[in-house]
Image (cartoon, grey):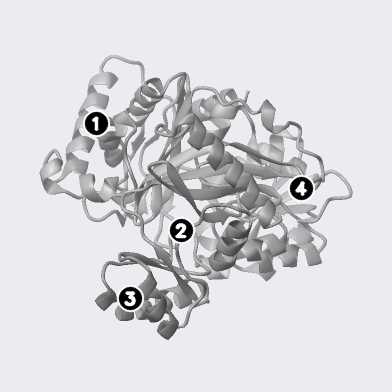
Amino acid sequence: MTTAARPLRKILIANRGEIALRVIRACRAGGRTAVAIYSDADRAALHVHAADEAYRVGGAAPADSYLNISAIVGAARRCGADAVHPGYGFLSENPAFAEACEEAGLTFIGPPAAALALCGDKSRTRRAALAAGVPVLSGTDLLSDAAAMQAAKDLTFPVLIKAAAGGGGKGIHLVERPSELVGALLLARGEARTAFGDDRIYLEQWLDRPRHVEVQILADAHGAVVHLGERECSIQRRHQKLIEESPAPALTPELRKAIGKAALAAARAVGYRNAGTVEFLVSGRAFYFLEINARLQVEHPVTEWVTGLDLVALQFGVAEGEPLPFRQGDVRPRGHAIECRISAEDVDHEFLPSVGRIGEVVLPGGPGVRVDAALSPGMEITRFYDPLLAKVIAWGPTRDEAIARLGSALRETVVTGVLTTIPFHLWTLAHPGFRSGHYHTRFVEEEWAAPSRRPDASPGRWLAALAAAALAARDDRRPPLLPPQDAGAWGRAARQDGLA
């Protein structure tokens, strides 16, 4: 990220879907012009209509559009943009994209290219964190297969094989016994080469049933680094987060303070700037550095709810060269917030993607409820992009009240035309393990996947039918539903309340 010589007035959002809408709204709130990009598949998407200007950047496949650096930078130059906001996913953590923006005279709203490159190399980031005194799991440096076999003798199985260029929960393989290592190395390198264009790997000690806790950080160009508290992300499947909450329910005050301090040290060690997240595994009273996600996170609304801050607006300020407007002592989280990611997936069949045309859309609202979505009737859900449809977030003075509000919001939500993960989220919110706050990263694997512990052989359809019956009963006692666009306005009002 370069420091802007003047305020940023026109920002191109190099993304799609709900995060593009989120950044567009932040632009509008700050009096900035928002420019969207779109692929052939997204020509009629909501973010295209919401922006002040929109430019086609290629075909439906991500490689032809949202990963097309030259097309995106070209669109930014043609429209006269001052800056580019990458959102999350796609090119958001690509140092070549940040460099291309800078070379074109565009401010990249994110970390400097050098920090992106360092954070993208998990092995180098581990070394930097270790040098800064941050606890790191036992593991190895980058290894050849022969060296990995030798190094594994000093580790206790199971171990993890991790892609050096991995991220977002991808490029990770569990090896339970030494006899599986050779085959796992071959598979891991092949997947890493395909997914990241880089087959370098390293080994890391595996923890049994840890908690996944991440810390939101902000750093400006003047040396200030603060954290905005932590988020619990242990409800996940195959290393992909499904539910996030803040504060983490099982951390002691002492452990919370130590993790926050370690996150700041890790951020300084890599020369970080702008918004990012430092991730840790927690086991008992010990915690270990995992990685730095060098971008705005999907789950950033959770932190916005409990802090009252607008993280995207703060990103803009840092990109303009402004100092952070507060210090660490000014950050005082209040209440509790929980987010559920609503995706187009079949929860009864290994969370397989569900494609089709969206029918009815009813989004929830009310006190303490926020919805970040880019859904509309007639919208086509394709195989080209991530299946995330919406994020439903609830805040309450206590965790129990946040859970209650979120459950009510999910029961109000209607999305037809594709299968969604709403039944899974309702099941999780009602589960004693989740409600107690004492859960871990294998919760979904052990609880949802165990047939003997589910309501019946098809809990998703069972819960969906239950929710439909409840909605039908409610419809008999209330006025007709608002049009979908007005239901979305409820979500926008809730969002504004959350940022107040």
Q: Which residue was labeled with disc 1?
A: 432
Disc 3 residue type (three-letter): Ala
**Reading the chain from its start, which is encountered first: label 1 or label 4?**
4
Q: Going by the image, does 490 lie left or right of 329?
A: left
Marks 3/1: CA–CA distance: 36 Å
Cβ–Cβ below 8 Å for labels 2 and 3? no
Tell me the quadrant of the picture where the N terminus can be found: bottom right
Give neighbour class at mark 2: few <14, some 14-19, many 20+ (Cα, 10 Å).
some
Q: Going by the image, does 453 lie left or right of 212?
A: left
Whether residue 407 is visible, yes or no, is yes
**Mark 1 or 2: the one toward you:** 2
Residue 258, relative to residue 357: is it above or below?
A: above
Along the line of sight, the residue nearer the viewer: 159 or 325: 159
**Reading the chain from its start, which is encountered first: label 4 or label 3?**
3
Q: Which residue was labeled with disc 3?
A: 184
**Reading the chain from its start, which is encountered first: label 1 or label 2?**
2
Marks 2/3: CA–CA distance: 20 Å
Q: Which residue was labeled with disc 2?
A: 137
Q: Position of residue 209 (x, y in %)?
A: 31, 49
Marks 1/4: CA–CA distance: 44 Å
